[in-house]
Image: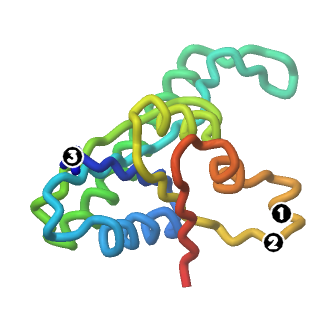
């Protein structure tokens, strides 16, 4: 059997649920004996506000757009640092980590990245919203479970 690299992608964001899913992935999907695993950390930034209009119909000033972009970039860096800290806590030197930051609608970016990167498994946390909230807000994990071209593991925090 071919000993090719196994790619496991974990979608991370600011939530405790996504960080728990990352911890679960390292504990359960990446073994100490398998040196052929790559952990792909994916963070999705919301779409840029460059073309957004405020409630009065005015385009945001360039200073406002720049400030929003700086905040979004800092948030992405912060989430990735937090995810890297979780990986270090497992003291797993065999984990090959790739960090990817996408921009756009989370559900589409996650599914497209999983396909483009050829991941073997996509892991996501679940916020545990009830039926009403999930119906109103939509569920990124539900969408990915139905549309991703690879197996999807949705991890619920106990």
Q: Circle 1 sits on which residue? A: 133
Q: Position of residue 52 (x, y in %)?
A: 72, 21
**Residue 36 vertical position relative to residue 23 in the rendered view, above or below:** above
**Residue 155 vertical position relative to residue 70 in the rendered view, above or below:** below
Identify the element where label 3 is drawn. Answer: loop
Most foreground residue, 120 or 3: 3
Q: Where is residue 142 in the image (x, y as percent from the top left)?
A: 70, 55
Q: Can see residue 78?
A: no
Q: Nearer the viewer, mark 1 or mark 3?
A: 3
Q: Which residue is drawn at 18% across and 52% down?
A: 36
Identify the element where label 1 is drawn. Answer: helix
Most foreground residue, 158 or 150: 150
Contact flag, marks 2 and 1 (Cβ < 8 Å): yes
Which sits earlier in the primary sequence, circle 3 or circle 2? 3
Residue 102 falls left or right of residue 130: left
Q: Where is residue 141 in the image (x, y as percent from the top left)?
A: 64, 55
Contact flag, marks 3 and 2 (Cβ < 8 Å): no
The CA span between labels 3 and 2 is 43 Å
Which sits earlier in the primary sequence, circle 1 or circle 3? 3
Q: Residues within 10 Å of mark 3 (few under 14, many from 20)?
A: few
Residue 2 tag number: 3
Q: Circle 2 sits on which residue? A: 130
Q: How crowded is mark 1: few (under 14 residues within 10 Å), some or many (20 or more)?
A: few
Residue 85 falls left or right of residue 62: left
Q: Which residue is drawn at 48% across and 52% down?
A: 122
The C terminus - image quarter: bottom right
The CA span between labels 1 and 3 is 44 Å
Q: Can see residue 35?
A: yes
């Amino acid at each position: 059997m071919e000993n090719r690299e196994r790619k496991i992608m974990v979608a991370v964001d600011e939530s405790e649920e996504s960080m728990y899913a990352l911890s679960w992935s390292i504990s359960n999907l990446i073994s100490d004996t398998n040196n052929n695993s790559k952990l792909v950390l994916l963070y999705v930034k919301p779409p840029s506000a460059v073309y957004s209009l405020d409630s009065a119909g005015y385009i945001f000033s360039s200073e406002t757009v720049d400030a929003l972009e700086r905040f979004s970039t800092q948030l992405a860096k912060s989430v990735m640092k937090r995810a890297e800290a979780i990986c270090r806590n497992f003291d797993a030197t065999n984990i090959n980590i790739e960090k990817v930051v996408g921009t756009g609608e989370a559900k589409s970016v996650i599914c497209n990245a999983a396909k483009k990167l050829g991941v073997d498994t996509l892991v996501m946390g679940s916020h545990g919203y009830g039926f009403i909230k999930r119906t109103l807000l939509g569920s990124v994990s539900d969408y990915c479970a139905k549309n991703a071209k690879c197996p999807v593991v949705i991890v619920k925090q106990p």
